[in-house]
Amino acid sequence: MLTHVNDLQSDKDVREISLTGQVLLETPLLNKGSVFPEDERRVFHLLGLLPYHVAPVEEQLARTYENYCRENSDLGRYMYLASLHDRNEVLFYRLVLDHIREMSPIVYTPVVGLACQLYSHIYRRPRGVYLSYPYRDEIGTLLQNVTHDEVRVIVVTDGERILGLGDLGVGGMGIPVGKLALYTLCAGIHPAVTLPVVLDVGTDNHALLDDPLYLGWHHERVRGADYDAFIEAIVQAVQHRFPHVLLQWEDFAKGNARRLLERYRTQLCSFNDDIQGTGAVTLAGLLAAVGVTGSKLSEQRLVILGAGSAATGIAEQLVAALASEGITTAEAKRGIWLVDTQGLVHTGRRDLAVEKRAYAQPQERIAAWSVSPAEPIGLEEVVSQVHPTILIGTAACTDGFTEKIVREMAHHVEHPIIFPLSNPTSKCEARPEDVLTWTDGRALIATGSPFQDVTYQGRRHSIGQCNNMFIFPGVGLGVLASRAKRVTNEMFIAAAYALSEFSPARRDPTTSLYPRIEDVRVVSRSVARAVGLAAQQAGVAEQSSPEELERRITEQIWEPHYSRLILKKD
């Protein structure tokens, strides 16, 4: 269960501040709204600026939730929570924690996708930093304008590949904002040490360029050497301004995502959640699923629809996990089949990017198939030939897992493991109720977006959400607590194994492969512990006793409560 204070007001936490009056009310991390007690109202010159009644925190929460419920659309609910976030951060985080199952899909996927698409039309108030290409010679100055010096976690995107929606330009800012909210909600990272960043390098989305309300730089995307120089300038400026920061690369297009990760992973404490986070959370679900089937990871045949950052990240994590079972890299890759828009990824193709070539199947393995290797080999043919035990979708291909494909898979496998992971919901490769019907209720399913439980032939099946929120917040907490200087693949493997231990399906196959969203803080703490120990073992973090690491983890976790305020003397 969630562990947070029972009361929003804490007299044990005292803060000395100099802000008063309207400025204090407009400072989100200090504003208490109607909960300000009378003595603080007098000291901080708030009398008359608030209604007379001093509200108990329970009343404030009830009123806020009541107003949230009045919104009649997901977008309206998103905008209401964004507005609350902007005016009272403590209340925002407490409200969402109390209703995390209901509200996390609003704060992040799938609703954040719609909010990003409409960003310039629903924009109310700036949050974070907009590093725009026309200011490329002033990046240091732009970062100096950030008023808080102790930034420890940055999430950055250039908006080119937002979820499965494509290039949304400056509208991509909704992703860093949402991800960092999850850092706080799921792992207790203090919001004051987080910073969302969008890199505005233009957009190739002509609908945005033609939109007079578009808030970004009205210019086609900068690419090539100019783009790389811009990224380099930003990395250097970030390291100078915030030398102890953890940077998360988010929603970069496949041509840049892995390239930037590989270039900077040894220079900067950073990771790419689309690659490593998705890989780890998927691996955790697969570990739980093979545990349910009574098989081993090394015995699986995996087909992935999609060959971008998420797909190669999953493959990379799987290969690393198999190494712990004594399986060689070459042997592990033989069981992984990727299918992109041009068909099966194999060595006979000449159009493969470097990251795809690493998982290209030898052409001789498909020589006896009924189709010519010179022609695109689609998912249907691959499934019929490979007889996969695991089918994963990361291609944002709506209904990509057809009835024929799923039934063919189920014909050869007792318990097919099927993960349609693409976000948002509209891009999902198959709906859970269809998958269960086509497999006679035998499939083990996880999805990228949240779905309701499904009843099949009188038996209720809980659909687990393969949600990165079970991984990246705990990774961040572990990095901060262990004072790690780098993020390694071993740290993500440790995170995956820690998460898999929380799978309810290990006890009942009809239940979710992933834990309840309500338990995410407990999960994140366990993930942080595993990540911290792995960082120490890899030699990238300060050595400490397990007890000291546990103490540091506890020290890092912020609970959303109001501090007792006292006036700072001149």
Image (cartoon, helix red, strand yellow):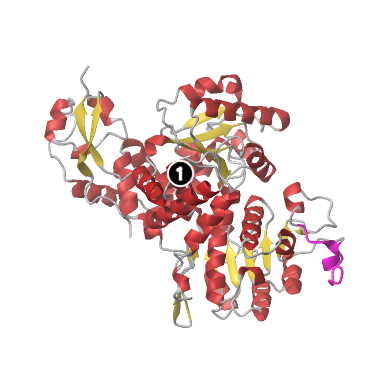
Q: Main secondary structure of the magenta part?
A: loop
Instruction: Quarter of the image for the C terminus: give it.
Output: top left
10 Å crowding of disc 1: few (<14), some (14-19), many (20+): many
Q: Can residue 93 be seen in this view?
A: yes
Residue bounds of the magenta highlight = 360-373
Which residue has dot 1 on it? 482
- Verify whether residue 543 appears in magenta: no
The extreme top residue here reads: 570
List x then y, in percent, for residue 393: 62, 61
Residue at left offset 26%, top offset 34%: 31
Q: Quadrant of residue 428?
A: bottom right
Residue at left offset 23%, top offset 45%: 8
| Drawn side of residue 98 relative to residue 291, left or right | left
The extreme bottom residue here reads: 457
Q: Quadrant of residue 138?
A: top right
List x then y, in percent, for residue 400: 65, 63
Of residues 181 and 193, the one drawn nearer to the viewer in this rendering: 193
Residue at left offset 76%, top offset 73%: 385
Of residues 456 and 506, the one drawn nearer to the viewer in this rendering: 506
Instruction: Quarter of the image for the N terminus: give it.
Output: bottom left
Relative to residue 224, is residue 521 depicted above or below?
below
* Residue kind at label 1, given as amino acid type: Ser
- Verify whether residue 372 appears in magenta: yes
Relative to residue 464, is residue 165 depicted above or below?
above
List x then y, in percent, for residue 426: 55, 57
Residue at left offset 47%, top offset 22%: 144
List x then y, in percent, for residue 195: 45, 35
Q: Quadrant of residue 402?
A: bottom right
